[in-house]
Image (cartoon, rainbow, N blue to C red):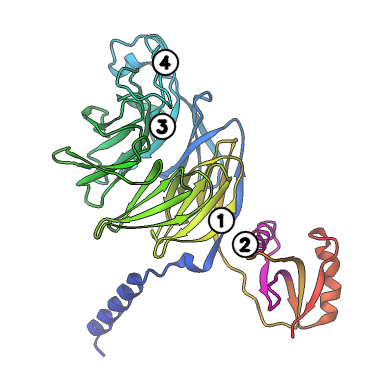
């Protein structure tokens, strides 16, 4: 067979596998591997340029920056002197209130939004319940990813929330919650290009693949706005669910969390079809796996993280988090999933291969459950603590968690005491 023919067959097989949506994460489960604490109350978390950026709640007045192992690199205060950036009518020192962030495609700048500004002349801030153009404007900061200092600022609308940057680095768009509009900014220098009214309480944003459209979640209108980039014309799509919040885009589909319906919806733009997955309570931010086969969503009120298989919108895993998970991001190459918990922590999860059950005569059992979900959660917890665990299902409907297996009964007895740190009386199950 010729080399060319072999190559063509290889390409065809690869494409066929991709079309079926096979993923390396089909056979893995999330395991918690690290928790970061300190003087933080992270409201969002973003990976970019090899770093983890956490925006802390407004009264912390800071962005904390970490390496991908979770070591703190720098705490960046939100204090600025606006006149140093050419804002001549603002004298003195001002503070912000970081909300969200987004990194430029070239990795040069990390832009953050500030809920409001504090200082002279800022005395009419917007609020969560506000929807009016009369409130104070706020500012975005461009943080230089090398110096980790503010290089540029950009004046936008009232209570700016989410930011999205086009893949060609031409447009930065921010949703302004209280002023019901979006600001279009040059991400390279911070100059304002345009302001566009979109609807009540805009939140999530996502560009399509070729940057010809941007989609905006309108939490206050239960709708999604579609904005044409060239003409800046706005079309509003109603019936998006009760409070759509965060949006992702991939392969001509929108995926958005519906905050008050405890679900994530997939909207196929090619045929206008929709399907949903039920997740935890009050789903907030989402992030794709690095192969976009899965989405991770944090559930704020039920303190959990859900993993959704996008091919069929099935929830394949839900794992506990710390209090009030509100942000999530995924690192490139390694697919580490970082979760921001408003209660005061950042948690790292990794995809690990599910432990396999070998055919043995005897198993060391440390737990028996009627619910497979509870057995999986216990198994994950043990694996995280250094006891690789697997699950045995049986005809009686029980799911038993095993931490050791052997064909030698005497070896099982010798090791039994070792596992008393897990449960008081681990027992030996004989396989029949």
Q: Which residue matches tag 3?
A: 147
Q: Earlier in the sequence, mark 4 or mark 3?
A: 4
Q: Are marks 3 and 2 in contact (CB under 8 Å)?
A: no
Label 2: which secondary element: helix
For the residue carrying disc 4, how many other residues have a C-alpha within 10 Å: few (<14), some (14-19), or many (20+)? some
Q: Earlier in the sequence, mark 2 or mark 1?
A: 1
Let me know if residue 110 appears in the view: no
Lateral position of residue 16 relative to residue 403, left or right: left
Q: Which residue matches tag 1?
A: 318
**Quarter of image, res 372:** bottom right
Residue 122 location (% of width, % of height): 38, 13
Lateral position of residue 234 relative to residue 83, left or right: left
Q: Depth check: 423 or 238 in front?
A: 238
Please check the rendered image and state whether residue 376 is part of the magenta-colored stretch, yes or no. yes
Q: Which residues are magenta?
A: 374-403
CA gap, disc 4 and disc 2: 49 Å
Q: Which residue matches tag 4?
A: 94
Q: Which residue matches tag 2?
A: 373
**Quarter of image, res 275:** bottom left
């Amino acid at each position: 067979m010729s080399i060319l023919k072999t190559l063509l067959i290889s390409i065809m097989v690869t494409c066929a596998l991709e079309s079926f949506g096979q993923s390396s994460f089909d056979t893995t489960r999330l395991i918690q591997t690290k928790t970061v604490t300190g003087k933080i109350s992270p409201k969002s978390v973003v990976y970019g340029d090899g770093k983890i950026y956490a925006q802390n709640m407004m009264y912390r007045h800071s962005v904390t920056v970490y390496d991908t192992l979770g070591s703190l690199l720098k705490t960046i205060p939100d204090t600025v002197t606006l006149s140093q950036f050419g804002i001549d009518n603002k004298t003195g020192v001002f503070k912000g209130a970081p909300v969200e962030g987004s990194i430029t495609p070239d990795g040069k700048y990390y832009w953050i939004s500030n809920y409001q500004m504090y200082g002279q002349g800022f005395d009419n801030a917007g609020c969560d319940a506000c929807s009016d153009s009369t409130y104070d404007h706020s500012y975005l900061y461009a943080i230089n990813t090398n110096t980790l200092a503010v290089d540029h600022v950009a004046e936008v609308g009232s209570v700016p929330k989410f930011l999205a940057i086009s893949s060609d680095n031409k447009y930065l768009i921010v949703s302004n919650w209280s002023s019901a509009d979006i600001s279009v900014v040059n991400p390279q220098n911070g100059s304002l290009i345009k302001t566009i009214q979109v609807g009540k309480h805009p939140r999530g944003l996502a560009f399509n693949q070729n940057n010809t459209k941007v989609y905006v979640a309108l939490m206050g209108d239960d709708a999604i706005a579609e904005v044409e980039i060239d003409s800046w014309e706005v079309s509003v799509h109603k019936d998006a669910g009760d409070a759509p919040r965060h949006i992702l885009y991939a392969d001509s589909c929108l995926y958005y969390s519906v905050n008050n319906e405890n679900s994530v919806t997939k909207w196929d733009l090619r045929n206008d079809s929709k399907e949903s997955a039920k997740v935890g309570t009050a789903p907030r931010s989402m992030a794709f796996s690095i192969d976009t086969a899965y989405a991770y969503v944090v559930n704020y009120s039920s303190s959990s993280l859900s993993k959704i298989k996008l091919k069929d919108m099935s929830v394949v895993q839900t794992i506990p988090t710390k209090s009030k998970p509100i942000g999530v991001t995924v690192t490139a190459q390694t697919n580490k999933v970082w979760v921001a918990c408003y209660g005061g922590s950042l948690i790292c999860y990794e995809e690990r291969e599910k432990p396999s059950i070998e055919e043995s005569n005897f198993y060391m059992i440390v737990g028996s459950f009627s619910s497979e979900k509870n057995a999986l959660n216990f198994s994950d917890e043990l694996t995280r603590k250094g006891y690789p665990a697997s699950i045995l299902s049986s005809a009686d409907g029980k799911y038993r968690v095993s931490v050791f297996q052997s064909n030698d009964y005497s070896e099982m007895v010798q090791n039994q005491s070792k596992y008393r740190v897990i449960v008081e009386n681990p027992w030996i199950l004989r396989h029949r």
